[in-house]
Image (cartoon, rainbow, N blue to C red):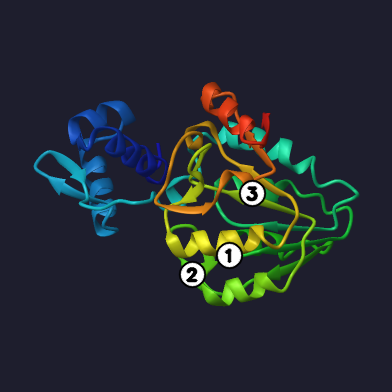
Amino acid sequence: MRQQDRLPLILERLAEHGSVSVVDLSAELQASPASIRRDLQVLEEQQLLKRTHGGAMAAEVIYELPMRYRGGRSQEEKRRIAQAAVRLVDGSVHSVGFNGGTTITELARLLSTGRALKVVTNALNIAADLSVRPAIDLVVTGGGVRPESYELVGPIADRTLADISLDLVFLGVDGIDAEAGISTHDEIEARTDHCLMRATRRVVVLADGSKIGHRAFSRIAPIGEVDLLITDAGADRAELDRIQAAGVEVTVA
């Protein structure tokens, strides 16, 4: 297993247990203790953990797993969600908006290049991918960069979004709850996401099952501002029922 594949797994174990040992990681990941120690050093240099004798413990504050370590998590579920979402971009849709995140990135990769489509995004990685597709008329918001999510946020992004109108907006979130609404880890990102929502009449939230019933630090919007949620079969059924009762259409991919 390559180091780039081991690192997110180490961070997942750390999130689950609060600490990890070199011996256990070496056995689980089938890597030498020396390789595991080098992995822990890399993650400590990025301030994602603190090394201890024989292992590591969680850093004092870890609010959000950086996006570069989230790509492999629930990958198949995210792909199915994206496949269900892209079917909404039919001939009646001429403009769409994307924020960032791994599931939204999967969706952007599936966009057909067979017809003209205007796309507005504040995600640098999505913009880089779409910029080479000649059928895509791409608008990037500008703003300050959040390294954790590759998103442009803040007043510059908000002002850009205030002056546009879109047919459809796809939103990735860190949590969706019938009472708390949709949420993310960062309060500045939450405001920019809400500005993107206000630029359209239809908001589609893409969230894998781990996000259902979860509340992150900053609320983006109340549940009543979401039109459709697309999730996977791993979502809590009772929570999905509550979300539906709040007026949100739910699709399980």
Q: Please tell me how crowded label 2 is: few (under 14), some (14-19), or many (20+) other residues with Cα within 10 Å.
A: some
Q: Earlier in the sequence, mark 2 or mark 1?
A: 1
What residue is pinned by disc 3?
A: 225
Q: Is residue 80 above or below residue 37?
A: above
Answer yes or no: do the residues labelled 2 and 1 have beta carbons within 8 Å? Answer: yes
Residue at coordinates 60% horizontally, 29% vertically from top-left?
232
All told, the count of numbered labels is 3
Q: Is residue 119 left or right of residue 31?
A: right
What residue is pinned by disc 2?
A: 145
What residue is pinned by disc 1?
A: 124
Q: Is residue 138 left or right of residue 116?
A: left
Q: Please tell me how crowded label 1 is: few (under 14), some (14-19), or many (20+) other residues with Cα within 10 Å.
A: many
Q: Is residue 198 left or right of residue 67?
A: right
Label 2 – label 1 distance at C-alpha = 9 Å
Q: Is residue 135 above or below residue 54?
A: below
Q: Earlier in the sequence, mark 3 or mark 2?
A: 2
- Residue type at mark 1 is Leu
In this rendered view, identify the residue nearer to me: 67 or 202: 202
Q: Earlier in the sequence, mark 1 or mark 3?
A: 1
Residue at coordinates 29% horizontally, 58% vertically from top-left?
46
